[in-house]
Each structure stands twice: as structure tokens, then as C-alpha cells.
Image (cartoon, grey):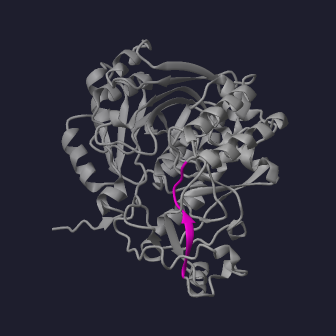
């Protein structure tokens, strides 16, 4: 019996191949409809799995004057494909689509296939040696394999060939995938992007993103192309009607000039916003990145070892040991050489994890004696990063975004990597930016900049900020009053009135 070792909570086979097989007939129907099959087509399914796309093609078209090639890295998948299509004219081959020499030749010759359809692996396990090879071949971010399949298969298409993929929607906005977006927008005409909840896909329910189906044609002649964005949320069966051109069941549809997407910041699609939001983001004269330094926080390398909760009532403290806060130094700022650790008897200082609105109570402490701080500075897993911002007054923004924008004063506490530290370059903007980062306007802009759950420094920097000098004192008064009353709802309502007024003319 083969032992399937666990890697990152999944079996090695599960991590290596990351095969989420497409078993939804509405999804299959829609995708095959967008493939636009013609006689004489040379079709590729680059990660065939159990062959459901091929099966759908064979069962729904009377056309048989085409060739189909099915590739997969998993030998068990190849065995299943050979059994399923033994009486069909389907060429089946075990191969690594990203590295196969025959496909290299096709790419160098300008393409080979006229149609490519698939469901590439998401986040497949890669050994370090393979990551290094892929980095040399594709550049950029190689840990998320589906974007590599997008790039590879675009190269494998003949001119005017068509590709239809179902993939996570993260590539539409994440900074890491800027290169993939640029390649697609330069070398293809993106006809349609259909956005749908990950729960529509059997066996998949991502917490950090949803799915999308991208349909494109390989051509550099795309200057006048408009990309159709289709949002579907209610029922996966709505895809049956959409597949034949009936969009009445879609939550919304929108056409965006491809040139506008290419010219946007980082070539982002900004699918989380409307036209007005895209305009203000792309044309902003002043951004948060110009007004403040936005940096990622500290990581101990082993939180279970070095962090303690204030008490067992703290959320997420179940597996942590606690001695209460008796060893915590609340007067840690009095230490002259704090970046090198505590020299006295106390061993712990406050650290901020997660976040809240306007104020975040101290719930966690991190070990900070001189010996341990030296460990943080030298350990491979620890991240003693952006240390010149430690213990400075600034604003904390949770890395994982919730439905409403959240930000709080750091109060000169250490902040961990689950928090982005925002440090205004001019102190007079501290309360103003704190308020802005808690406003509904900010929520709307952030959703457009990055529609996923990620709130990293790169996205916060892009936020368009209108500094209304006449409103700075008004905002200061709101924050001062909040510190006295601790009435968050009243403060947030007043903040929203201010920023709705400031952004009224542009939103």
C-alpha cells in the first residue's frame, strides 16, 4: 500500500495535483458553449483529470472532424482517461503541461491548438527544484500554478485560437499576478469573464476568493475590444440560459474597454467597483501611499512558543499557554533600547493581532527579552521586518478584510504580520486617515482595488485620498469625542457623513 504523506493538511497527492474536478453540468455547458467549436479544430485539455470537458464536447456536438488531446500529470488520471475514451479519437498522454518539451516546440512555433479548455490546478504542491525551474521559465509568482497554465496555454494557441478556463478570480486584481494580466491583455482579446461563487463548484468553497470563467481569443488586434463582465450569484443553473446568450438571470453585466483595463494601475480589472470608482482609483492625484508609509508587521516565527494571551477569554487562545499578564511590561516604551529587547525582569510586551475599529484593546503579549529578540533577528522563520516603524504611533489595518473597512490606533504597540501599519508622513493627518480608513467610502474603494479578502500594504497604498483641509478639524473633534465616550456607532456615523460629503462629487 502506498502511504500518502500529509503536506500542509492535505495528502501529498492532493497537494501535488490539486485536482478539483468539474462535475457541474451548468458550468460545463457554459464553458463548452464559449469554446465555439468548428470543424477542423485541434483541441487541448491541458489538465484533463477525469475528462469531463472532453466528454461534454463529444456528447453535445455533432461535429467530429476535430482532434482532441488530453494531458495530465497524474498517472491514475491517465489510466481513467484511457478507459473512458478507449473507443474515441482522443490522444491521451501523461505529461507536465508546464514543462513538456513537445509543448515547448509548439510555443516557439507560435502555437499549435485552435481551442483549449480546462480547469487548471490551484496551488498545487511544488518541490523547491521545480519552483526554481518554473521561476526561470515564467518569472514572477510561481506558487499559484493556475496562472502559469494561463500563460502557457496562451502561448500554445494558434493566432485567433480560443481559450476557456475556470480559475480563481484572484488573478484579476492581486499584485502578484500583474505579469499574467499584462501578458493576457497584450496578446489576447478577452471576450467574457463570468464571476461566480466558489460554492457553485462541487467540492470547493474558497474563503479568500471566488471563481471566474475567462473566455479569450489569441490576437494582438484588441485595441477596440470590450470585455464583458458577468456576475452570477443566485443559482448555478442560471449558466444554462447565459450559455445561449440570455443574461437576464445575471446579477449584473458590464462592458469595459480592454484598453482601459490595460492602462489601469497594475493592469487590474477592478471588478469590485463601477465606472466611477475605477476612474477615481486610476486618476487619483493623491493616494494613501503618498500620504503615509504602509508596511507589514512582525512575525515571531512560532507564535505558540513566543506569544501569550491576556487570558483564556481571548479569541483564538485555546492552544496557547498563559501566565496572565504578570510578566508583561506595560511601561515598555520607557526602555531606551527597545529594539534590542527588555533588559529588566519583565519579559513580554503588548502586540496587536487582528483588528477592530478605532480602538483595539491589548489582548496579546510577545516575549521580548534581549536573547529572544536576537533570535527573531536571525531565525529563518521569524520576520523582524520594517523594525524602524515598531513602537511608532500609527494606524493598524487588519490584513484580512471584512465587509466594512476597519482601522485602529496602534498606540505605539508592536504589530504583527496580520496587521498593516499605516504611518502618516504628517502627524496632522493621523486622525483624518484613521477616520477615512473606517469609512464606507474606503470600503467601497478597497473592494474595487482588490475584491478578494486580502488587505495587504500594496492595495492600501493605492487608495485615493481626498484631503479636505476644512474637514481635518471636524474629524479631530469626532475622534476626541470618541475617546471620551467610546461610542463607536456614533463616531462611525459621523465619519461617514464627513467622507460621503467629501467624495460626493466623484462618487
449 or 256, which lies in front?
449
The outermost residue toward the front is: 484
Quadrant occupied by the C terminus: top right
Residue, x 46% and y 34% (percent of image)? Answer: 212
Q: Residue at 73%, 38% (x, y): give it.
A: 464
Q: Position of residue 62 (x, y in %)?
A: 30, 18
Instruction: Say whether residue 355 is magenta.
Output: yes
**Quarter holding the N terminus?**
bottom left
Answer with left or right where residue 33 lies relative to residue 253: left
- Asked whether residue 441 appears in the rendered view, the answer is no
Q: How many marks?
A: 0
Q: Is residue 346 left or right of residue 29?
A: right
Q: Could you say where residue 80 lies in the image, as x and y percent from the top left?
A: 21, 46
In the image, residue 20 lies in the stretch drawn in magenta? no
Is 56 situated above or below 389? above
Q: Is residue 229 among the parts visible in the rendering?
A: yes
Residue drawn at x 38%, y 53% is 95
Residue 136 appears left or right of 433? left
Q: Residue at x 51, y 46 (%)?
A: 147
User: Quadrant location of residue 186?
Assistant: top right
**Which is nearer the eye, 3 or 136?**
3
Reply above or below: 31 against 403. Answer: above
Kindly indicate the quadrant of the structure image that contains residue 183.
top right
Q: Nearer the viewer, residue 375 or 63?
A: 375
Residue 492 locus on image (x, y percent) = 60, 37
Query: Of all residues shown, which one is farthest toward the left?
Result: 1
In magenta, the rendered stretch is 347-356
Name which quarter of the figure residue 297 lies in.
Answer: bottom right
- Residue 210 image offset from top left, x and y in percent: 44, 38
Amino acid at each position: 500500500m502506498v502511504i500518502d504523506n500529509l503536506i500542509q493538511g492535505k495528502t501529498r497527492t492532493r497537494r501535488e495535483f490539486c485536482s478539483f474536478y468539474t462535475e457541474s453540468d451548468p458550468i460545463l455547458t457554459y464553458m463548452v458553449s464559449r469554446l465555439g467549436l468548428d470543424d477542423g479544430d485541434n483541441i487541448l485539455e491541458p489538465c484533463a483529470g477525469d475528462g469531463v470537458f472532453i466528454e461534454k464536447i463529444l456528447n453535445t456536438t455533432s461535429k467530429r472532424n476535430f482532434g482532441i488531446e488530453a494531458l495530465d500529470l497524474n498517472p491514475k488520471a491517465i489510466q481513467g482517461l484511457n478507459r473512458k475514451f478507449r473507443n474515441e479519437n482522443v490522444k491521451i498522454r501523461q505529461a507536465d503541461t508546464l514543462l513538456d518539451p513537445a509543448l515547448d516546440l509548439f510555443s516557439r512555433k507560435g502555437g499549435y491548438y485552435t481551442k483549449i479548455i480546462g480547469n487548471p490546478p490551484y496551488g498545487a504542491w511544488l518541490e523547491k527544484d521545480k519552483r526554481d525551474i518554473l521561476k526561470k521559465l515564467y518569472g514572477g509568482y510561481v506558487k499559484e500554478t493556475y496562472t502559469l497554465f494561463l500563460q502557457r496555454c496562451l502561448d500554445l494557441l494558434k493566432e485567433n485560437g480560443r481559450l476557456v478556463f475556470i480559475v480563481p478570480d484572484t488573478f484579476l486584481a492581486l499584485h502578484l499576478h500583474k505579469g499574467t494580466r499584462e501578458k493576457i491583455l497584450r496578446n489576447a482579446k478577452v471576450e467574457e469573464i463570468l464571476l461566480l461563487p466558489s460554492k457553485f463548484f462541487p467540492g470547493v468553497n474558497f474563503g479568500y476568493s471566488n471563481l471566474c470563467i475567462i473566455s479569450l481569443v489569441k490576437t494582438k488586434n484588441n485595441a477596440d475590444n470590450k470585455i464583458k463582465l458577468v456576475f452570477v450569484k443566485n443559482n448555478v443553473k442560471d449558466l444554462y440560459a447565459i450559455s445561449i446568450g440570455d443574461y437576464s438571470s445575471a446579477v449584473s453585466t458590464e462592458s469595459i474597454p480592454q484598453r482601459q483595463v490595460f492602462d489601469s494601475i497594475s493592469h487590474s480589472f477592478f471588478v469590485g467597483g463601477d465606472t466611477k470608482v475605477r476612474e477615481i482609483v486610476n486618476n487619483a492625484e493623491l493616494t494613501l501611499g503618498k500620504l503615509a508609509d504602509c508596511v507589514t508587521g512582525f512575525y515571531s516565527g512560532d507564535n505558540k512558543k513566543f506569544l501569550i494571551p491576556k487570558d483564556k477569554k481571548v479569541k483564538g487562545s485555546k492552544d496557547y499557554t498563559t501566565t496572565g499578564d504578570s510578566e508583561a511590561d506595560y511601561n515598555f516604551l520607557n526602555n531606551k533600547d527597545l529594539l534590542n529587547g527588555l533588559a529588566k525582569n519583565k519579559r513580554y510586551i503588548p502586540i496587536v493581532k487582528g483588528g477592530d475599529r478605532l480602538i483595539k484593546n491589548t489582548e496579546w503579549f510577545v516575549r521580548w527579552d534581549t536573547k529572544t529578540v536576537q533570535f527573531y533577528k536571525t531565525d529563518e522563520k521569524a520576520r523582524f521586518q520594517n523594525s524602524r516603524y515598531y513602537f511608532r504611533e500609527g494606524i493598524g489595518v487588519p490584513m484580512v478584510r471584512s465587509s466594512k473597512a476597519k482601522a485602529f490606533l496602534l498606540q505605539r504597540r508592536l504589530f504583527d504580520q496580520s496587521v498593516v501599519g499605516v504611518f502618516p508622513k504628517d502627524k496632522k493627518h493621523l486622525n483624518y486617515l484613521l477616520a477615512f480608513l473606517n469609512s464606507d467610502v474606503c470600503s467601497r474603494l478597497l473592494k474595487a482595488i482588490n475584491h478578494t479578502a486580502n488587505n495587504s500594504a500594496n492595495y492600501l497604498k493605492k487608495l485615493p485620498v481626498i484631503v479636505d483641509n476644512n474637514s481635518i478639524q471636524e474629524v479631530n473633534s469626532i475622534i476626541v469625542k470618541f475617546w471620551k465616550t467610546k461610542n463607536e456607532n456614533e463616531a462611525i456615523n459621523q465619519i461617514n457623513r464627513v467622507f460621503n460629503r467629501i467624495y460626493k462629487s466623484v462618487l
